[in-house]
Each structure stands twice: as C-alpha cells, then as structure tokens.
Image (spheres, rainbow, N blue to C red):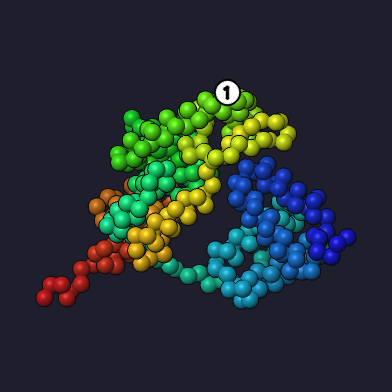
Amino acid sequence: MHSQEIPDRPRLLDRVREAIRVRHYSRRTEKAYVSWIVRYVRFHQMRHPREMGARQVTEFLSYLASGRGVSASTQNQALSGLLFLYKDVLGVDLPWLDDLVRAKPRRRLPVVLSREEVALLLARMTGREHLMTTLLYGSGLRLLECVRLRVMDVEIERNQIVVRRGKGDRDRVTLLPATAKTGLEAQLRAVKQKHEIDLAKGAGWVLLPEALQRKYPTAGRELAWQWIFPGTRVHIERETGRRWRHHLHESVLQRAVKIAAIGAGIPKRVSCHVLRHSFATHLLEDGYDIRTIQKLLGHRDIRTTMIYTHVLNQGPLGVRSPADRL
C-alpha cells in the first residue's frame, strides 16, 4: 500500500458518503465531513479510525485550535464530522471530550454597505450578474440560494421568491424587489428558449434531489425545474447517458462582485454575503420589525438577526450620542 493512501479509503469513505446521503444531508456537508475525516487520519499517520478514539479526536481538535488557530465554527464543524464518523458509520459512541482545547469564539460585526455604495456597485454591473446581485441585496438571498433558483421558485405576480432547501434544509419565502422584475422576466424567457434548444438536441435535463428524481422520473426535463441561472456547459451523466446542465457556478458571481466593488472604489471587503447583511440592516433602518426580517432571512434564532442592530447608521443599538444634543 502506498504510504500516502488512507487505509481502506474506498470502503471507509464510501460508507461515510452512503450514511450521509441516507440522511439527506447536503452535498456541501458531505464534502466537509469527508475532508475532515481525511485530515484526521493523516494527522495520526494514517491510522484507521477504528484503532483510535476520544483521545485522538481530542488531540486533533486541540491541534486545530492551538496549532492552526482555526475559528470556533471551523473546529465545531470538524468535531461534527468526526462524531458522525464514529457514531453513525463505525457505531462507536465517544465519551465527552473533557480535555478538548476549544477555539475561542470571535464575535465579528458584519460588513455592511451604505445605500449609496450598493448603488455604486450595481452601476458597475450589467446583464445576468447585475440581476443576481440585485436579488442578493433586494431579497436577502445567500449566494447558493441565488444560483440554485429554479423557474418554479419565482412568483412574479405575488412579488415573492420561494427559497427551497436553504441553509439547514429549510424552505422560506422572501420578497421579490420590483426593480428586478423586468430583468427577471427577460431571464426567464432566455431560459425557456435555451431549454427548448436543449430538448431539440436530446438534452434538457437538470439534477433533482434523489427522492424527487425517483418519484418524478421525467421532471428533470420540465421547464419548471430548470435553473434560472444555468451554466454554459452540457454534462453527460455516466450512468444514464442523460445530458444535463448544472447551475451557474457561484465563483462567477463572486468574481463579478469583487471586480465591481474595486471599480466602484468601495473601501470595504465586499463579498456576495455583504449584500445580504446590507439587506437586513437597511430594512431595520426603515423601521421594519426584527421578527419579520428574521423570517425573510431564514434565521432559526432571533439572536442571529439581532447582530444587525449593532451596525445601524444611528450608532450602536440606535443610540444617539449626547454630543449631538449640544
């Protein structure tokens, strides 16, 4: 066996993937868990996880915190992956990790753009990227929620967008900004035209969640299931020979936003997620109830939404400085 290979790698990691998919976890969770398991095994010189236990898990996680300086959320993700490996794949319950050196949680205030900065950013963008950026800011969408929108998810007459299988595998409804309607209608027409061309060429499939694919075998060729922002390439599914399109890769929009922010001269670290932060903050500034904003954002805990009260343009917590009363 090659010295850099993981013992029983195909069997172990295939079991991990199978256990994850049976529980309908997202592909991103699968990728993260597999990555942490591989790093854990390599950290312990390629020993099989069955030969290790709580002490080795503690050593690895403590190394991440003290040796690599990872954030608390990163360490918790690694811990979740390893607990999943032992409990759900290997059938081993680990005792509580008392000696674990925990990464210190750092409370960071979100970067928020002013309304003028948002306008400058959008002014530097055109076409598809302009529309997608408008939805990030105008609807409070996460980046992946935006690129994964399907034709059925947009209800123009009702001024709403249905976000399906968002973070935490939860659905929610958010608003559709009026300023995006014209561009969105044009994009939907373009998607329909491209789909008809794909169908004529024997393609036209999109990937569906496995359970839906089994229940509705032909739904993957229906217009309602097509991506609103499809990729440019047509892929061939090895098992079935079906020709399908993936959605636009998220890096396309990330790059466009970064270039636009630099061109607009915005002196902040601008990312796609900053637009979601700006959406929430500007709604608070306009006097909307924080519970309503929580629902639009899809936050499970109101405390997550409360952080935006600290970045209002009225100062921390909306308090007016006594110096302004002199």
- Point out the residue furthest to the left here: 326
- Residue 202 to residue 308: above or below: above
Which quarter of the figure has residue 41?
bottom right
Location of residue 235 with respect to 204 vertically, above or below: below
Residue visible at 42% across and 35% down in the picture: 187
Query: Is residue 213 shown left or right of residue 282?
Result: right
- Find numbered disc 1 in the image and state the secondary structure of the residue it sits on: helix
Relative to residue 173, is residue 261 depicted above or below?
Answer: below
Residue 14 image point, x, y percent: 76, 48
Q: Quadrant of residue 205?
A: top right
Left or right, 43 with reference to 120: right
Q: In this view of the protein, can residue 31 be seen by the observer?
A: yes
Residue at the spot of label 1: 200
Q: In which quadrant of the rendered image does the C terminus lie?
A: bottom left
| Kind of residue indicated by mark 1 | Ala
Which residue lies at the image location 57% right of the left edge and 23% below the top edge?
Answer: 200
Task: Please report the residue visible at 62 percent of the width from the left and 25 percent of the height from the top.
Answer: 202
Residue 158: x %, y % from top left? 33, 32
Residue 306 shows in the view: no
> Is residue 288 depicted above or below 37 in this figure?
above
In this view, the residue in front, 224 or 116, is 116
